[in-house]
């Protein structure tokens, strides 16, 4: 309905940028004392080995449909899949593991497959420079490319730096699809940096222009939130987002359809105002978190969906909210504020992979090399339900 009204010009156009109600002085901000979590779970641990499977290890593991279903049921103590399976890849050097142990306040970004170059944040206070670790997660290919165009300095402990950013190299890429590799630090920041109490994730193509302490005050502490993310500019329903992904060739069309059919079968409705949230679709390029057991669980469940199905994380966010039945509270802030947090830079080159251009399932049958080998395996595993008669909700095409 909202899309239909927009097509005939009956909805006001959202502002691209708007002022953010920030305090004036980072030095005046009082960091609140953290309290013991009163929500479930209170104890969270992670499965690190698929003991019943003897094949090659996978970073995301081999979560069964039953394990997936059980993971959405909140209990006091929970143990779930959350990436980083033993010998599954995404390994850090010992010097970096030691360095990040001290990082309780983190600003993190990532570059994979050489699609971006590091952009130095601006307007950062002296207090924030001392308080935060600025961590840029890269793969070996991106590190080599950065080395050619940026001045990398090395400290006495062997740490590599580009300006304010400490480069954290991940060895042994867990996936053969670069978009999936980028989801590891983005969604599983609490697994990479387990001592982090607060974190701000910003995509590699962005230049942060707001002091991170002001960001935490505005989006977490002021409203007593533990998770904040922006509303998508155009889409509220995951089915709208899926349709846009197909039209823009963001992933194989038949696999996006299969992903959405599974969500329809499991009861995920298109967004409507009765849901009580501004949208089911976020702008995932900036994520602001306090790392509580529930926040970390949400990130694990979100990542597991990305690992199991398509790497388009915006399609899975609202589904995880739905499966948690309102237990996960978060702040979805206006898109115009989101656009005021950064300067957007162009990728250094266009991303493209063969799987993104697949139009029908027969192309996979003719060329097995189009399939991913380490991710999206839920799309090729028999689903315990009849999807033959499932129809994806119709989507009105709106001008974006």
Image (spheres, helix red, strand yellow):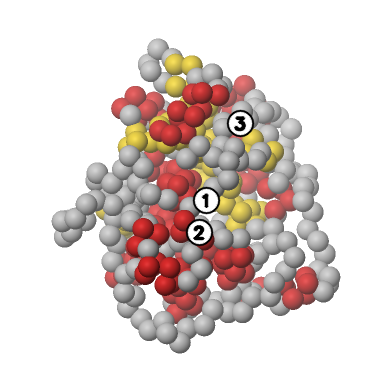
- Measure how far apart labels 3 and 1 are at the Cα level: 23 Å
- Foreground of the two, 258 or 17: 258
**Badge 3 element:** loop
Residue at mark 3: 119
Query: Which element is circle 2 on?
Result: helix
Q: Is 279 located above or below residue 177 in the figure?
A: below
Name the residue beneath numbered marker 1. Answer: 352
* On-image quarter of the N terminus: bottom right
Residue at mark 2 = 356
Q: CA distance from mark 1 to mark 2?
A: 7 Å
Counting residues from the N terminus, which is met first, the one under dot 3 or under dot 1?
3
How many marks are shown on the rendered structure? 3
Neighbour tally class for label 2: few under 14, some 14-19, many 20 plus, Cα within 10 Å: some
Across and down, in percent, residue 322 comes to: 50, 69
Category of crowding for the residue at label 3, using alpha-carbon neighbours closer than 10 angstroms: few (below 14), some (14–19), many (at least 20)? some
173 sits to left or right of 326: left
Q: Is residue 191 above or below residue 207?
A: below
């Amino acid at each position: 309905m909202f899309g239909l009204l927009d097509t005939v010009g009956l909805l006001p156009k959202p502002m691209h940028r708007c002022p953010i109600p920030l305090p004036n002085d980072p030095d005046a901000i009082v960091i609140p004392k953290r309290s013991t979590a009163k929500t479930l779970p209170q104890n969270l641990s992670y499965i690190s080995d698929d003991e019943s499977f003897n094949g090659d290890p996978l970073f995301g593991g081999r979560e069964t449909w039953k394990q997936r279903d059980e993971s959405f049921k909140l209990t006091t103590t929970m143990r779930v899949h959350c990436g980083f399976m033993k010998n599954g890849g995404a390994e850090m050097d010992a010097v970096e593991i030691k360095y990040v142990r001290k990082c309780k306040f983190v600003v993190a970004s990532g570059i994979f497959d050489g699609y971006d170059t590091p952009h130095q944040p601006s307007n950062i206070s002296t207090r924030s420079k001392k308080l935060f670790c600025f961590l840029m997660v890269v793969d070996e290919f991106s590190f080599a490319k950065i080395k050619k165009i940026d001045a990398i300095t090395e400290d006495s402990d062997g740490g590599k730096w580009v300006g304010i950013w400490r480069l954290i190299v991940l060895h042994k890429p867990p996936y053969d699809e670069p978009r999936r590799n980028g989801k590891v630090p983005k969604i599983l920041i609490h697994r990479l940096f387990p001592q982090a109490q607060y974190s701000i994730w910003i995509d590699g193509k962005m230049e942060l222009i707001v002091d991170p302490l002001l960001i935490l005050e505005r989006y977490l502490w002021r409203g007593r939130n533990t998770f904040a993310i922006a509303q998508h500019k155009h889409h509220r329903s995951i089915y709208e987002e899926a349709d846009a992904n197909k039209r823009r060739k963001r992933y194989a069309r038949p696999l996006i359809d299969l992903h959405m059919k599974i969500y329809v079968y499991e009861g995920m409705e298109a967004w409507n105002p009765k849901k009580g949230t501004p949208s089911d679709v976020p702008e995932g390029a900036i994520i602001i978190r306090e790392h509580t057991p529930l926040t970390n669980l949400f990130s694990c469940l979100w990542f597991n969906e990305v690992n199991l199905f398509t790497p388009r994380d915006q399609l899975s966010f609202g589904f995880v909210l739905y499966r948690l039945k309102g237990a996960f509270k978060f702040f979805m802030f206006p898109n115009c504020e989101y656009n005021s947090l950064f300067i957007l830079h162009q990728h250094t080159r266009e991303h493209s992979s063969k799987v993104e251009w697949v139009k029908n399932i027969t192309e996979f049958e003719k060329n097995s090399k189009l399939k991913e080998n380490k991710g999206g395996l839920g799309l090729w595993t028999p689903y315990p339900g009849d999807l033959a008669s499932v129809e994806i909700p119709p989507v009105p095409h709106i001008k974006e």
